[in-house]
């Protein structure tokens, strides 16, 4: 479990009590390490994050280079990978894999496998690609190759609706109570970049959310994806909203989501990277993001 991408883990923990519906926003100029990407598109009021280099031109792979792709994923990490009501795998990652194959005009299969042993399965070449939230770390890079990052975990502040809006800066948060999960990367980030804020630690994310809703703290700082689902849930009851950010510092929150490949197959990585870039340019990535994250977290 420790090798899963940080955002995926946080979302699953959050979804345990939140109803789930069927890449960055403009950042504060004064906010440290806020997300940096080319100007994002918007889907209505939702900013679509973009981590692709607009100056890079990828060549479409030759037709014969990749004739099919055998994807694997897990079925226990909604909204990324799970079993739908029809008994078939679905989710953001599953639909993205299908869109990659449609763009490449090649047949694909998507196999469900358990998380345990997944890295070894990919490294041994028993599948062509895994789209399952395998974290990009020195250890995983020693065994696997990775596509371009297509989505990052983002930390966000939330506050109660109706509160005076203002820039989120270290000075502005001086003396303000900020709920965080005890021992989390978000606590460490807050201590490093907002040292004068009054950190109020909680044992669980649910307890931190309830404190914000009840008004016993001024802000909550946590996983943006997790908070996005809560903000649209009945449990939140419209109490709160995002403010400031997003923050995507990989040293704290991980490098993000990418597709993992066995080593020694650069043609598959080239094809997938080209397809991912094309899907963003065509707007398909935006459609998928809005489908699974109607309250965007960037």
Image (cartoon, grey):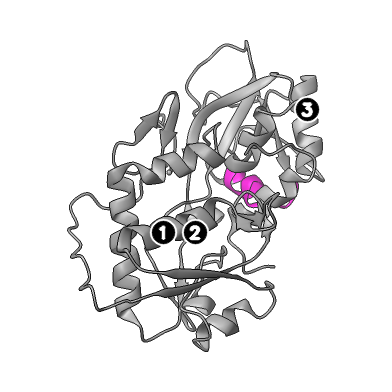
Circle 3 SS class: loop
Q: Please name the residue that numbered disc 1 is placed on.
A: 149
Mark 3 and mark 1 lie on one chain; the one further toward the N terminus is 1
What is the x, y in percent for residue 67?
A: 33, 76
Magenta region includes residue 223: no
Label 2: state its secondary structure: loop
Q: Quadrant of residue 101?
A: bottom left
Calculate the distance from the C-alpha at mark 1 to the C-alpha at mark 2.
Answer: 5 Å
Would residue 52 appear left or right of 123 to someone viewing this image? left
Looking at the figure, which quarter contains the N terminus?
Answer: bottom right
What is the quadrant of residue 18 in the picture? Answer: top right
Residue at the far bottom in the pictured view: 124
Q: CA distance from mark 3 to mark 1?
A: 32 Å
Whether residue 29 is visible: no
Quickly name the residue at label 3: 235
Q: Nearer the viewer, residue 203 or 128?
A: 128
In this picture, which residue range is highlighted in magenta? 182-191
Relative side of 217 to 74, left or right: right
Residue plotted at (39% across, 75% down): 68
Pointer 1 with pointer 2, Cβ within 8 A: yes
The percent position of residue 168, horizontal first and vertical second, equals 50, 27
At 58% from the left and 40% from the top, the residue drawn is 224
Q: Is residue 184 magenta?
A: yes
Residue at which label 2 appears: 257
């Amino acid at each position: 479990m420790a090798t899963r991408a940080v955002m995926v883990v946080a979302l699953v923990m959050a979804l345990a009590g939140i109803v789930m519906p069927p890449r960055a926003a403009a950042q504060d100029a004064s906010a440290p390490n806020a997300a940096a990407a080319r100007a994002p598109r918007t889907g209505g009021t939702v900013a679509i994050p973009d981590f692709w280099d607009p100056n890079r031109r990828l060549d479409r792979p030759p037709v014969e280079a990749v004739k099919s792709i055998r994807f694997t994923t897990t079925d226990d990490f909604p909204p990324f990978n799970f079993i739908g009501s029809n008994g078939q795998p679905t989710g953001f990652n599953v639909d993205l894999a299908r869109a990659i194959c449609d763009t490449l005009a090649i047949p694909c299969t998507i196999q469900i496998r358990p998380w345990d042993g997944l890295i070894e399965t990919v490294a041994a070449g028993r599948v062509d690609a895994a789209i399952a939230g395998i974290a990009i770390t020195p250890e995983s890079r020693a065994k696997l190759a990775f596509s371009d990052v297509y989505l990052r975990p983002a930390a966000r502040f939330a506050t109660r609706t109706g509160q005076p809006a203002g820039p989120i800066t270290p000075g502005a948060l001086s003396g303000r109570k900020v709920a965080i999960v005890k021992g989390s990367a978000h606590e460490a980030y807050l201590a490093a970049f907002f040292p004068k804020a009054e950190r109020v630690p909680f044992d669980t994310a649910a307890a931190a959310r309830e404190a914000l809703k009840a008004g016993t703290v001024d802000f909550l700082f946590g996983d943006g994806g997790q908070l996005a689902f809560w903000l649209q849930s009945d449990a939140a009851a419209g109490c709160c909203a995002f403010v400031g950010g997003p923050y995507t510092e990989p040293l704290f929150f991980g490098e993000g989501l990418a597709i993992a490949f066995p080593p020694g197959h650069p043609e598959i990585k080239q094809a997938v990277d080209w397809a991912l870039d094309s899907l963003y340019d065509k707007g398909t990535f935006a459609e998928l993001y809005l489908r699974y994250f109607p309250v965007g977290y960037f």
